[in-house]
Every structure is written in C-alpha cells, then in structure tokens.
Image: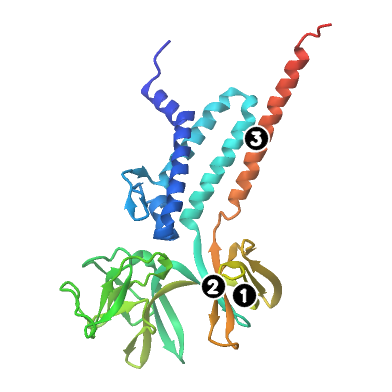
Amino acid sequence: MPRPSIAGRLLAILSGYGLATILLLLLGLLTWLATLEQIDSGLHHTLRKYFHWQAFYLVPEIYGELLPLVLPGGYWVCALLLVNLTLGGLRRLRQGWSHAGVLIAHCGIIYLLVAGAVAHHFSERGNLLVAEGTASNVADDYFEHVVEVAEVQAGKPAAIQVIRGQYLTDLEGLRSRTFRLSAMPFDLELARYFPNAEPKSVLEQAPPEDLRPYDGYYLMAKPDEVKAEANTPGCIARILYRDGRKSESFLLSSAAFQPFTVRHEDRVFTVHLRKRQWLMPFTVRLDKFTAEFHPGTMKPAKFVSEITRLEDGKEAKAVIQMNEPMRYANLTFFQASYQRLGQGPSARMASVFEVVRNPADQWPQYSLYVVSCGLLVHFLTKLAGFIKGLSRQPNHV
C-alpha cells in the first residue's frame, strides 16, 4: 500500500476527529478562564484579550496572578475549527447518504461559527438613555470615540464632519496625522492619542518631562477602566488654515464638558472628542419605567420599560425588560440599566438600553435548527437501518 503524501497526511490531520476534540477542549478552557478573568478585568477587556482577531495568543490572569500557561486566541481556535469541520464534511461526502444527518449537523455548526465571525467584525453596540416622558433616536457607541468638527449657526450645528476612531487610535507617541475637512475653511492636525487620560492643571500637579502643557493643562494617562466604556481618551490638536497659518495646539478630551471653540472671520466652529453617535431609523419614547429589587437588597429582580416606537407618523407600543429584548429594524434593544435624574420625589426615572446592530443576530438560532434537523435525520437513518436489519433476520420457531 503506497504511503500517503505529505498533503494527504496534512489533510487527514486538519479534517480529523482528533484535531476537532483538541479545539473543542481548548474553547471550553478559554471560555472558563475568560469567565473568571472578567470578574477583575471587565467584560470588554477580557473579550478583546481572549477572542479578538488580533489576539493570536494570550496568558491568563486569574485573581491578579498570571498563570504559567500560553494559550492560542479564541478567534483563531474557532477559525481552525471552521477549517476542520469544512474539510471533514467534504471528506465524508464520499461516504454516501448514510451520513447525511452528520453532514447537515456539520453545516449547522459551520453556520454558527460564521455567525460569530460576522458579529465580531460587523456588529455595533451602543447605549440609549431615555427619561420618562421623553424620546430619542440617537445611540452612543459604547467604545468608539470620534473627533466631531461642526460649524455653529443660530446656536445649532449646521455642517458636521466626523473623524472615525480607527484613524485616531494609532497616533501614539510622536505620531501625528492631518485631516482634510472639505466643509470647513481649515484642516485639523491630531497627535499623541491617549486611550484613557484626564486633563490635569499644572497648578494641581506638575507634568512629567515628556508631557507639554497647553494653556495650563496637560493629559495624564490612566490605566484602562474595568468597564472599557468608561475610558476617557484624549489627544493634541491644531488648526491648519488654508493660507498656511497654524493655531496654537490645544487639548481634546472626552472628559471635557464643552467642545473646543474655533472662530474664523465671522464664523464659529466647535471641535469635540466624544463617543460616536448613530441615528436609528425610528424614535423611542419611554412612557413608564418600573424597577423591582430583591427584598432587603439593591440586587435587581426586574426592570421593565414600557415604550412607544415612533416611525413615519405611526406609533407602536412595546415592552422591554430583562432577558426580553425588543427586535426591530435590524436593531436589538436590551434593558441594560436605569438612572434616577435629580433628587427627591420629583426625580424622573430614565431607562438605559443597550442597542445592538448585528447582521447575524438570528443566525445562531437558525444554526441550532439546522443542527437539530441533522441530528434528527441521523437518528432516523440509524433507526431505519436497525429496523431493516431486524427484518432480514430469519424467524426461528
């Protein structure tokens, strides 16, 4: 019997049950360690460490102690599992219809892995805060910060240009980048981006030697917050006028209460570092919010938001509560939290919704249907074979 080629042996390994078993065990271990680590490190940080596509390997840290263990990133474990299932399914196509159920189940798991990849790369998450009796159609992104440049006319922003976060996060150290603002009479130069920092007055604390103050303030770097959405990034900015003039450098910080104001001739502009906002195709009005807690504790038992969805002059009632989101127009609204606005009996309640735009939102559910169908077909195939085998046995008197 001829010895298999190197390509054949590699294909056998990549499509084999042994590799599938190892990968599934690795995924179980990574999930368990990530669940432990997120207690101290926060959910977003842990997900990025364990399952982001840029995390090729990781060292677990449990209860503040690094484990002497180097593990592959969960994203690439799933990618290799996808290859394993696909090649394994193609190899087993040649084994006939007796394995049809297994192949269908294979397709369902592949569908589930693809759904995870689509969600990882294309989903957006934000939050929407709405007080009782008010309405909003704007969600704030949880993590992405942008620089928003706007011209102010009659007290309102008229023309707005946005510099997305992907063009800011790599401006570390002495790196800088100039952005052409076609709707403005100037361009903007940004440099020295801090993922998390706070403006400090030189009167409060002298700056380090490598940090230069601007107008009496400098940006002091801080470690990432446990809840990454609480990070307040900052950077250094400078206005570049079209006639070659340059303004003095100034600080931009998402912790600032007001944007930086620029006056050019008789026009007024604002420059603001803030979380990215995205418009929803409808408006949400909060009619009533109800919070229930376990007796004697502040542990939530039930949050219920009665809302009205306003769209094209029409109204539709809906209820959003814990573990019962609202899905509409490719958006999912989860009951995330609440806030009390003000003090005393007159204080209004506000509901905080997590808004998720995920093109693969329902794909995991569909994949489970496919897997269930495959297992049912496999069971019926085996049952039919068993009954057929019994019918062939001779009857003994």
- Tell me where residue 275 sits by quadrant: bottom left
Point 41% across, 85% down: residue: 151
State the mark number for residue 346. none
Point 64% across, 68% down: residue: 320
Q: CA distance from mark 2 to mark 3?
A: 41 Å
State the mark number for residue 128. 2
Q: CA distance from mark 1 to mark 3?
A: 42 Å
State the mark number for residue 375. 3
- Tell me where residue 311 sits by quadrant: bottom right
In this image, 316 relative to 34: left or right? right
Q: Amino acid at mark 2?
A: Leu
- Label 1: which secondary element: strand
Q: CA distance from mark 2 to mark 1?
A: 9 Å
- Tell me where residue 233 sits by quadrant: bottom left
State the mark number for residue 284. 1
Residue 140: image x %, image y %? 48, 72
Mark 3: few/some/many CA within 10 Å (<14, 14-19, 20+): some
In this image, 355 relative to 206: left or right? right
Dot placed on the residue nearer the N-terminal end, 2 or 3: 2
